[in-house]
Amino acid sequence: MKKRAIYPGTFDPITNGHLDVIKRALELFDIVYVAIVHNVSKKTLFTPQERLTLIKEVTKGVKGVEAEIFQGLVVDYARKKNVRTLIRGLRAISDFDYEFQMALTNRKLSKSVETIFLMPSEDNFYISSKLIKEIAVLGGSVEQFVPRPVAKAMRKKI
């Protein structure tokens, strides 16, 4: 049986840091489901379908990546996919606080789901979608932080 994990997130937009975590996860798992959270209360730059399209475009040719949109609790999504492992990226201590709380809450909701934290490389450690959107809105170049198709889509949106 193939080892599978879920990497859930908003991915608005997907960054080089996200791609780094995906590649690291693929060193441990045969299949990584990039699960795009559709949270109607969160204001995003891209629609869930646009994010899905971008993720599929930038991971095309990367064996073992499957991208999907989901709504609801990630533990319910994991149960539906019959997956026991969630991947979460950690950049800094501030991330750890939130991620630790979320991992423990998910464990309380479903004892069969475990969370693994992966850190991106030093080159991508500081990148966040929020910061990249702010740079783009202020007219800065985001090409060094996101894949080319994402930068192009951001220029069209902003």
Image (cartoon, rainbow, N blue to C red):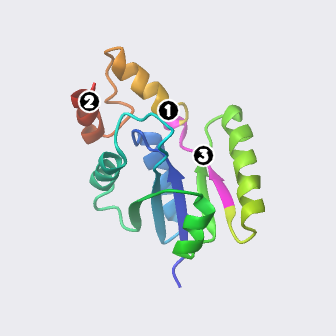
Q: Are marks 1 and 2 in contact (CB under 8 Å)?
A: no
Give the residue number, with chain letter if any, for mark 3.
119
Label 1 SS: loop
Give the residue number, with chain letter if any, for mark 1.
127
- The x, y position of residue 10, in whole percent, is 48, 45
Spatial CA span between label 3 and label 1? 12 Å
Disc nearest the viewer among 2 and 3: 2
- The x, y position of residue 111, in whole percent, is 75, 69
Relative to 137, residue 8 above or below: below
- Amino acid type at circle 3 is Met
Q: Image quarter for residue 59?
A: bottom left
Q: Which residues are magenta?
A: 115-124
- Amino acid type at circle 1 is Ile
Which label was assigned to residue 157? 2
Label 3 SS: loop
Name which of mark 2 and mark 3 comes first in the sequence.
3
Spatial CA span between label 1 and label 2? 20 Å
Pointer 1: residues within 10 angstroms few (<14), some, or many (20+)? some
Spatial CA span between label 2 and label 3? 29 Å
Which quarter of the rendered picture does the C terminus lie within?
Answer: top left
